Amino acid sequence: MKFNDLGLEPGLVSAVAAHGYRSPTPIQAQAIPPVLAGRDLLAGAQTGTGKTAAFVLPLLQLLKEPAGRAPRVLILAPTRELAAQILESIRVYGANARLRARVVFGGVGEQPQIDGLRAGCDILVATPGRLLDLAERRLADLSGVQYLVLDEADRMLDMGFIHDIRRILKMLPAKRQNLLFSATYTPDIRALAARILVKPVQVEVTPPNSTVERVVQLAFRVAKDDKRHLLVHLFENGANGEGRWTQALVFTRTKHGANRLSEQLDRAGIRSAAIHGNKSQSARTRALADFKAGKLTALVATEVASRGLDIRELPQVVNYDLPHVPEDYVHRIGRTARAGNDGHAVSLVSEEEAPLLRDIERTMRQPVPFAPTPAFARIASPAPAPQQPRATAAASRAPGGSSHRHRSRAAPRSYGRRRSGGR
Ligand code: AMP
């Protein structure tokens, strides 16, 4: 199958060819023809499948030329990062078109966005909150929308955007073409689909686990307080004989935890930045750009960054904390093994997290194998934590005062060894 076979115009085919795509991915092959034919679409696809091009390419073709000032395409996405990436994709795939694409999301000044909309816009990519705010103040005109895309609809519902989405829907013309993309089909998603889509073509390219199958997964048992030491060891030595890690995306559960870990990694000589919802948009954008440019070895992220982040050739994802929602694990590890590449995901599992791992394994219907926890050195800590774990306390009593020396050898705690070696 070639892009030519999908009914796409030569300008679009040459833009994707120039971007290095040789053939359409399954979601593209299945979604592009019906969208070009004007059908509504319900697509089961997660990030990493090429879903962005699956809706951007046909929409670029349907729009053809710039027209008027109000957007004709509205693409709603859950996070700023995803919205920014969709805009980037539109610019790449639409390199040979003259269409005007804009993005609006919160966390940054609104004036440039308002000015952009005033100057004219064919395709508007938005997160629901900021868009609703602008639309209610009549600063975004949604009366010309002919095509609506809900991208990562399940995530938008998880994030509580349903009310905003409902209000936005009321502002759109009733007659339009609707495309809904979702990684999972929960009852809420089905209800939303039933409400929005008219006789949709349904395509399902990703049995939820197909990305997962390309990710080599590994878990280490380690006490909570020893995780940072083990992580530094893994950065320096690899997890499975692959040698020093070039780059890794590390997930923590809390924003505070992300900040603290990023500082600890930095102090251990691993260049790092944190990315989460409390960071300003410019700090998030800068951290992501620095990571993509290879200036940072570690990007420490909370869940908000786990969806939609598209980092080419990201070899390694680390679950520093396991997520409470099993699906989040799938999305996190889906940041690696993208576009057909292999990827690796390592989870650091404390005793308290064992039930979370079981839930994850049940959801994926596959086990996450444990490897023996390697002996790791302790990284220096600036001040003793209020409640030091026994091993650390013992190490700091060792001759030479380990907490002030740079490294001291320490075996993992017995928990790390007891059941290691796998299941
Ligand atoms: P997405 O699922 O849209 O986030 O895309 C995931 C990754 O796949 C992105 O890095 C895209 O650039 C890449 N990609 C999309 N379509 C293709 C294709 N047909 N061939 C190769 N890579 C692609």
Image (tube, rainbow, N blue to C red):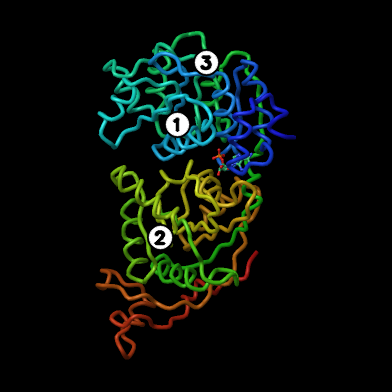
At 57% from the left and 38% from the top, the residue drawn is 46
Where disc 1 sits, the SS reads: loop
150 or 341, nearer to the observer? 341
Q: Quadrant of the N terminus?
A: top right
Say if 311 sits above or below 162 in the image. below
Q: Residues within 10 Å of mark 1 (few under 14, many from 20)?
A: many
The residue that disc 1 covers is 77
Going from the N terminus, do you reach mark 1 or mark 3 first? 1
Q: Quadrant of residue 4?
A: top right
The residue that disc 3 covers is 195
Quadrant assignment for ligand 1: top right
Going from the N terminus, do you reach mark 2 or mark 1 first? 1
Asked if the residue at tag 1 contacts the one at tag 2, i.e. Cβ–Cβ closer than 8 Å, the answer is no
The residue that disc 2 covers is 296
Where disc 2 sits, the SS reads: loop
Q: Residues within 10 Å of mark 2 (few under 14, many from 20)?
A: many
At 29% from the left and 37% from the top, the residue drawn is 107
Q: Residues within 10 Å of mark 3 (few under 14, many from 20)?
A: few
At 32% from the left and 70% from the top, the residue drawn is 267
Disc 2 from disc 1: Cα separation: 27 Å
Q: How many numbered circles does the render carry?
A: 3
Image coordinates of residue 89 in percent, x first then y, are 50, 36
